[in-house]
Amino acid sequence: MVMRWWRIGNAILVLLVLPLVVYLLNRVLAALERIRNASDQIVARGGELAGDLDGLPEALATTDQAVTDVATGATRYADSVSKLLS
């Protein structure tokens, strides 16, 4: 009698639980493969992007100079307006 319950339990394990585990493992591995492909594309395109950043220091220097010029002009304008209003 006890042996029959063990056989029924083993049959349930093999017929129901094991396929479910294989199915879930297959989904996890498929998602892992998609993540791996996406990360490979990011690395490849990131290398291409690094080549486009060669002129960045000169562009930042130009931007810094433009900000300084605008700040100087704005200060002069504000001083002029302040004198007119007082």
Image (cartoon, grey):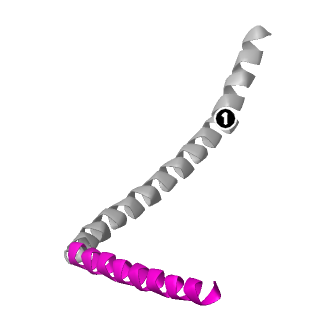
| Image coordinates for residue 83, horizontal then vertical, percent | 56, 85
Q: Residues within 10 Å of mark 1 (few under 14, many from 20)?
A: few
Residue 8 lies in the magenta-colored region: no
Quadrant housing the C terminus: bottom right
Name the residue carrying label 1: 17
Residue 66 lies in the magenta-colored region: yes
From the viewer's side, name the closer residue of 30 and 40.
40
- At label 1, which amino acid type do we have? Val
| Image coordinates for residue 9, horizontal then vertical, percent | 72, 23
**Quadrant location of residue 21?**
top right
Q: Secondary structure at mark 1?
A: helix
Magenta stretch: dominant secondary structure: helix
Range drawn in magenta: 57-86
| Image coordinates for residue 57, horizontal then vertical, percent | 22, 72
For this view, does 32 lie left or right of residue 69?
A: right
Quadrant housing the N terminus: top right
From the viewer's side, name the closer residue of 30 and 42.
42
Residue sitting at x 46%, y 80%: 75
